[in-house]
Amino acid sequence: MTKEEEVLTANTLGGLKVEPVSNRPQSLNMLVYGDPGVGKTVLAGSASEIDIMSPVLFIDVEGGTMSLRNKYPNVDVVRVSSWQDMTAIYNDIASAEPKYKTIVIDSLTEIQKFSMYNIMRDLVNADPDRDPDVPGIREWGKNAEQIRRFVRAFRDLPVNTIFTALAAQDKDQKTGAVLNRPYLSGKLASEVAGFLDIVCFMYIRIVDGDVRRLMLTSSTDSCVAKDRSDSLPPVLEEPDMKTIHQIVTGN
């Protein structure tokens, strides 16, 4: 078949390849959010125990990798302390053959702060009279767009991507109902959740004196969560990435 015939017979739309969804890679992209100490870091690090998800790169924004040191020592860690660090790491990862099968970003809550620090620093450099601690509507809008692009960029890498975030609680002033959601400003919490296939709320319950780590995978009146694979149980007890990967992919 000539190149011209290949072009004419290729299944394309607008110059883009069309293929069965079954041909798409079975990589995971997920967000795990919860209060400090519930086990988000350890859960993400457990990906290093699965051949299909290892090696793992842990992008440490919060400075909280002590829990990985003894349990999952094979995880590679890179510490970032600025938005520029984060951008440089992404550029290196995106421009080379994948070295890692899983990338963990811990956490989106801190990454959003880094983005705002960078925006306000540039603003004050241009206008020294501006208060660096009081962003305006324009700065919040720019910050939100940077985080949208950030999440999409890492999500679209040819690897498994695990984001973590702290949890926030929104209280309805009329009904008193409380909604747990990822700790991101404004509409970002719901927008980021929409970008990803799996969004889980991780929490702890003490039953008969025993600490149990639980993960909610389906939305409730009090929690934001979802599972596009429609395969995870509504609640997982003592979750790990091996179990999650096996359930979602069937492998």
Image: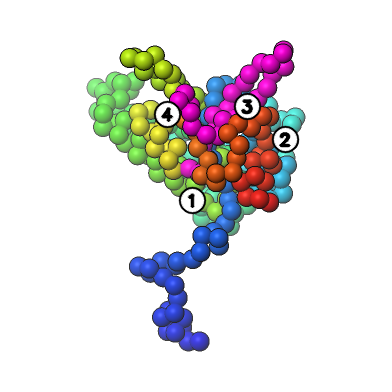
**Tag 3: residue type?**
Leu
- Left/right placement of residue 178 relative to residue 37 reads left
Q: Are marks 3 and 1 in contact (CB under 8 Å)?
A: no
Residue at the image position 44 percent from the left and 43 percent from the top: 195
Residue at the image position 33 percent from the left and 23 percent from the top: 132
**The disc label shown at residue 60, or none:** none
**Mark-to-mark CA distance, 3 and 4:** 22 Å
**Tag 2: residue type?**
Tyr
Q: Which residue is mark 4?
A: 184
Element type where label 2 sits in the image: loop
**Mark-to-mark CA distance, 1 and 2:** 26 Å
**Mark-to-mark CA distance, 3 and 1:** 28 Å
Element type where label 1 sits in the image: loop
Which label's residue is closer to the chain start, 4 or 1? 1
**The disc label shown at residue 156, or none:** 1
The image shows residue 170 at horizontal and vertical percentages of 40, 20
Q: Which residue is mark 2?
A: 72
Q: Which residue is mark 3?
A: 214
Residue 207 on the magenta segment: yes
Q: Are marks 2 and 4 in contact (CB under 8 Å)?
A: no
Q: Are marks 4 and 1 in contact (CB under 8 Å)?
A: no
Quarter of the rendering containing residue 130: top left
- Left/right placement of residue 177 relative to residue 102 reads left
Residue at the image position 64 percent from the left and 32 percent from the top: 236
Which label's residue is closer to the chain start, 3 or 1? 1
Residue 179 on the magenta segment: no
- Left/right placement of residue 206 relative to residue 158 reads right
Residue 132 visible in the current orientation: yes
Circle 3 packing at 10 Å, graded few (<14), some (14-19), many (20+), is some
Circle 1 packing at 10 Å, graded few (<14), some (14-19), many (20+), is few
Residue at the image position 30 percent from the left and 31 percent from the top: 139
The image shows residue 64 at horizontal and vertical percentages of 61, 26
